[in-house]
Image: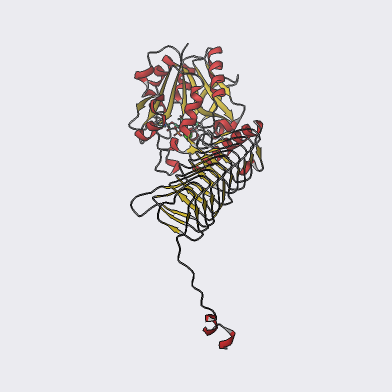
Amino acid sequence: MSNYAIILAAGKGTRMKSDLPKVLHQVAGISMLEHVFRSVSAINPEKMVTVVGHQAELVQQVLGEQTEFVLQTEQLGTGHAVLMAEEQLAALEGQTLVIAGDTPLITGESLTALIDFHVSHKNVATILTAQADNPFGYGRIVRNQIDEVVKIVEQKDASDFEQQIKEINTGTYVFDNKRLFEALKNINTDNAQGEYYLTDVIGIFKEAGEKVGAYKLRDFNESLGVNDRLALATAEKVMRQRINQTHMLNGVTFINPEATYIDIDVEIAADVTLEANVVLKGQTKIASEAILTNGTVVVDSVIGQGSVITSSMIEQSQVGADVTIGPYAHIRPDSVLANKVHIGNFVEVKSSSIGENSKAGHLTYIGNADVGSDVNIGAGTITVNYDGQGKYATHVGKGAFIGSHSTLIAPLSVGDYALTAAGSVITDDVATDALALGRSRQVTKEGYATKFPHHPQQK
Ligand code: UD1
Ligand code: CA
């Protein structure tokens, strides 16, 4: 029988105290909703319907074409939210997974196991539950003397006795699809929150003598429902542990995994070493034997094999093999560094390509430039790429030697093997093999300093 899925993502998330809809808050670099979507994809649903409401357009953009959407204009409760998918689903044979968009830690494996359990037990409804040390805030699973699930009671509706129950509703369920939409016709708002609770269908099924079951997660962490920023930080921590463990098992050395922050889609080869406070974001890829020292931040970039990045920041750029960068360098977007490039301390590179074996060791700004191979860029060199209106390009040919503190005023081309004298302001193109001097001659006046008050002869 076919699988279908409904993701609930219409709520505002009042307890987050945020302008951003709750399900769009991020965990390890992607929204909670995308985490849920990825896990749901593991059950290969024939149809997936996401219920949106609060800031619907923003939420829809995140999942795009990957799911159908239905609009819940007023957030009247989780039961009402599911009912919004009636037109899309109610007539279909099969089972439907319902999951909340604020449970980012539930894995695809658990959802697959839940479906298998539901089907093999021929249940009408199966709840994904977990055992909580502190169940406060969750719906509780009420069982009878023979341990059958009877109903779910929400925190705000629970009696003192029911509040002692530690088995909680994760907010994920599998239902016989047709029976789900029939039962939803019978729920009401007669409860502490005045909402249509999805959880009420469990009691309805049970009273009708239908088979209801629970599949308990082994790991409570998976069930975490994020309602506020405290839980968001917990989700981030659990996800970080999972991600870092996976990389360690794949052969990556972490000096301090608790303080290493890696987004979910980052790829890291074996034999990479990551020191403390390394942050790897977005679509970053790190090749083998690279070493990233303390505090290095890499965003949407590729780092080549054996490169050593020392306490530096790299954004949207490509770094080749055996490159050395830092300490305290900033590689800004659209930069391409070839193999064996050396970028030293306090160097900024932006929208530039730097050829193999070229070096900029100290205090330099390279912007909108293409620099050939085997170029030496002296300390304090800057490309003057911006006149307040446009950006202009600088070309430096292979083997060129840019003297320290050269000011290269773009647009400018320096030919292959050309030299610029230290301290030059270079305004005109320099031909291949030429030496360019762009500075005034020094004037020295012998003995002149003795006339000044600081000099011993004046005291
Ligand atoms: C819900 C469950 C609770 C469970 C907990 C697990 C109900 C009544 N309660 O409570 O038993 O322990 O999840 O985390 O279902 N939503 C809509 N439309 C609405 C209301 C909610 O789309 O009208 C969405 C929210 O965006 C959210 C999800 O449904 O993604 C859950 O809603 P939330 O208000 O967080 O429910 P809880 O109070 O956490
Ligand atoms: Ca919740």
Residue 440, given in percent of the width and then of the height, sits at 45, 66
Residue 429 visible in the shown view:
yes
The answer to whether 271 appears left or right of 34 in the picture is: right
User: Outermost residue toward the front?
Assistant: 433
Closer-to-camera residue (85/69): 69
Q: How many labels does the image show?
A: 0
What x and y, as percent, mark residue 40? 49, 24
Quick check: 329 above or below 240?
below
Query: Which of 29/319 is in front?
Result: 319
Q: Which of 9 and 269 is in front in this view?
A: 269
Q: Where is residue 413 in the image (x, y as percent from the top left)?
A: 42, 48
Q: Residue at x 47, y 67 (%)?
A: 441
- In the rendered image, the vertical position of residue 310 relative to residue 213, given as above or below: below
Instruction: Please identify the quarter of the rendering in which residue 12 is found.
Output: top left
Taking the image as shown, residue 451 lies to the left or right of residue 310, namely left
Residue 310 horizontal/vertical position (percent):
60, 48
Q: In this figure, which colouring scheme has been used for the structure? A: secondary structure
Depicted 140 relative to depicted 15: above or below: above
Residue at x-position 41% and y-position 24%:
66
**Extreme residue toward the bottom, this view:** 459
Q: In which quarter of the image is the C terminus?
A: bottom right
- The residue at 43%/44% (across/down) is 17
Can residue 230 be seen here?
no
